[in-house]
Image (cartoon, helix red, strand yellow):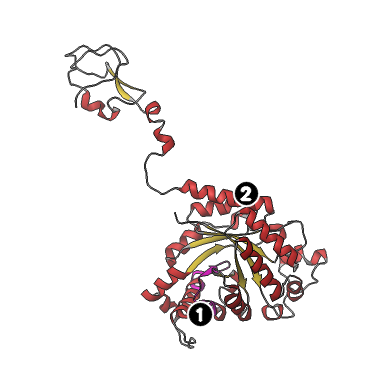
Amino acid sequence: MSELRIIAEAGVNHDGDVKKALALVDTALTAKADYIKFQLFDPGQLTSAQAPLAPYQQAYGAEKGTYGHGQQEMLRALSLTRDEVLEVKAYCDSLGIAFTATPFDLGNLAFLDRELDPPFIKIGSGDLTNAPLLHAAARTGREVILSTGMGMPDEVALALGVLAHGYLTSEIPAAATDFKALRATADAQQILFEKVTLLHCTTAYPTPMAEVNLRALETLRDQFGLPVGYSDHTLGADAAVAAVALGARVIEKHFTLDKGAAGPDHSASLEPVELTDFVERLHAMVRAMGTGEKKPSVGELENVTAARRSLVAATSIKPGDVFTEENLTVKRPSGGLSPALYWHILGRKATKLYLPDQMIEENI
């Protein structure tokens, strides 16, 4: 199995406080996540002034009197300035943990690409159909990790066609551009395989286990021929561990300093000790998946002699006696003739004396 990449999703769990953002970096580093990811947005470009809070945002924000009742007000409270983002990036660099982010508009995509040098660009599920953002992300030439929550197969196919166009050309798409047909070309399939990972995701916070639908991972991989991963919004680690067993190469998980804090994502996130355990469990599953080659493990080889059996004499057998079902049996340990030769031995004549429980040593 390919190496697993684990994204610790800080998101907006810094609550607009750069000191909390730096503490989240420390937490991700301690947990041994491969990346820490934040969100970059301009509240005025992301939402209209009338955009209401989602139900889960109302439950963990407005009802606690934190944000009022609109998305713009909430997002303003949860944003960092660009100078603060640069401070967080510099801190990540100093500690040796990779920084990346999800940009929610073209300006922040350009900021991420030009000033933050991310290892990849993460596009969230809400922008699966945001063709201009997808195209601009591909135009950077960087790897894109694309979440597909709320998506249908046709929407994923269209998104991949837009990405392929951005990777393969420097042209602005025409009104008649057939993105789905482009995706099916050999050049597009090659560049998409090199540059894009699809994440299965259920856009519900937290996600009930009955709505996880992990088999969609296999559907995405088989239908689109791309590496796949899982963006996990469930409580705990079970779904993500199972995703690794199904072939996920990327796992993304929200974390927080305090899941009891007021904010839209805190309650469905992992606290620091939980994040460390989460990462350990994922790597344990990677080890458990192994190479796929069927052969005895090191531990098994130590037990072969004690666990396997040999052909042995059930009674005394004199030279010239015929081996029969009555005088021949199978017992531990191994080391003698294999029981697989049982019917090959029956009917032959013994060439030596065998006492009860003695291993059969005939030349076959």
State how many labels appear.
Answer: 2
Label 2 secondary element:
helix
Precedes in sequence: disc 1 or disc 2: 1
Please report the bounds of the magenta region as a residue range: 134-155
Foreground of the two, 340 or 116: 116
Q: Residue furthest front?
A: 94
Q: Quadrant of residue 101?
A: bottom right
- Residue matched to label 1: 139
Q: Quadrant of residue 128?
A: bottom right
Q: Is residue 234 left or right of residue 136?
A: right
Q: Residue furthest right?
A: 65
Label 1 secondary element:
helix
Residue at the image point whose x is 54% and y is 57% from the top: 213
Q: CA distance from mark 1 to mark 2?
A: 37 Å
Residue at the image point whose x is 50% and y is 77% from the top: 138
Up-down relation of residue 74 to residue 354 (above or below): below
Q: Quadrant of residue 85?
A: bottom right
Up-down relation of residue 341 to residue 354 (above or below): below
Foreground of the two, 35 or 129: 35
